[in-house]
Amino acid sequence: MRRKIVAFLAVLVASVSVGVWLVQSCCIKNAFVAAASKDPSSVTVHYIDVGQGDSIFIDTQDTDVLIDGGPTTAGSTVLDYLDSLSITRIHLMIATHVHEDHIGGLIAVLNSVTNVDEILINNQAYTSKAYTDFMSLAQSHTIIVAQRGQTFILSETANLTVFNPTQPLEFTSVNDNSIVVKLRVGNTSFLFTGDAEADAEQSMLDAGLDLQSDILKVGHHGSRYATTQPFLDRVAPSYAIISAGEDNPYDHPHQETIQKLLAEGVTVYGTFHSGTIIASSDGTSVIFQDSPQPIPEFQSSIILLVFMMATLLAVIVYRRKHLVQ
Ligand SMILES: [Zn+2]
C-alpha cells in the first residue's frame, strides 16, 4: 500500500512538473537571445528601468534621443545609465508630457554635464514644481513644440515621426496630449506612446496614421484606459513593453491590458519584471539583448492546470486500483 502511495506521489509530482514546464515553455516560446548587432547602422533602444515612470534612450549612429527621464528620484539612475554607455550628448530630448514620472528625471540630465541640443515639448500649460524646474532649465536649449507630422532624421536608416499631439492641443487630459512618436529603422518600427489613452488613440486612428509597429511601448504604464482594441489592432505589434514600477500604487499594469496583448499573441515584457529592456534593429529584424522574460499568462491559470492534471491523475489511479481489485 505504501509503495502504491509513493508511486502515486512520484507520478503526481512528475506530472505537475511537466505541466508547469509545458505552460512556462509555451509562454516563453517567443523569447530569444541574440548578441547586439555590431552593424554601425543598427539602432538600439533602451527601455530604462526607472521604477514607476518612463525613460527611453534611442542610440543611433549619428543622433541620440532621450524620451522622458522617469520620476525626479530616478534622475541619477538615468544619468548613470547614460554614463555607462559613454553618452555625453543628447541630440533630441523628448518630454512626452508634463507629469513628474516623465519629466522629473530630465531635470537631473539638464543639470548635468550632458549636452542637450533640442528639446521637444507639447507646450501644455501646467503648474507643478517639477514642470516649473524642467521648463526653466529647458529655456537655455532649443525648444521645439511637437506637432503631428513632424519628422526628425536620426541617421541614414532611422527617422522619428510625431503622431500626437496636434496643435493647438486637442485635449484637456494631460495624458492624451502626450507626445507619441514612431521610430522607423529600415523596415522595422517602434511606437512610443507616453501616457496617451483612448481619446488620443482614437485621434491617431482617425488621422489614418501608419501606426503598425514591431514594438509597442504600451500607453500609460499598461493602464486599462489605454491600448484600446482598435488601436492595438492597427499597431499589430509583435512585442509590447510596459514601463512600470514594482508594486506601484496604481496597480499598473492592469491585468486587462496584459490579457488583451497576450490574446493577440503579443510577447509582453515589463521593466517591473525584467529591469531595463534593450532592443536592437538592423533595419530588417529586431532582437532583444539579455533575454528578458516575457510576462506570463495569469499565474492562476497555471495553478488551475496543475490542479486539473492532479485531479485527472487521481481519477486514473483510483479507477486502475478498482479495476485491479
Ligand atoms: Zn506616467
Image (cartoon, rainbow, N blue to C red):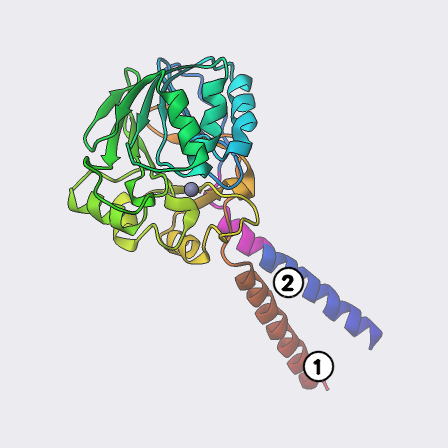
Q: Can residue 212 be seen in this view?
A: yes
Which numbered disc flags the more N-terminal residue, 2 or 1? 2
Image quadrant for the C terminus? Answer: bottom right
- Cα–Cα gap, marks 2 and 1: 19 Å
Q: What residue type is labelled 2?
A: Ser
Magenta stretch, main secondary structure, is: helix
Considering the numbered disc 1 on the image, is that residue within a helix, a strand or a loop? helix
Q: Which dot marks residue 321?
A: 1
Please tell me whether residue 118 is drawn above or below residue 290 in the rendered image. above
Residue 27, magenta (yes or no):
yes
Which quarter of the image is occupied by the N terminus? bottom right
Is residue 30 toward the left or the right of residue 158 in the image?
Answer: right
Nearest the camera: 288 or 167?
A: 167
- Disc 1 residue type? Lys
Where does the image place residue 269, in percent across and percent down from the top left?
Answer: 47, 42
Q: What stretch is highlighted in magenta?
A: 21-31
The residue beneath circle 2 is 15
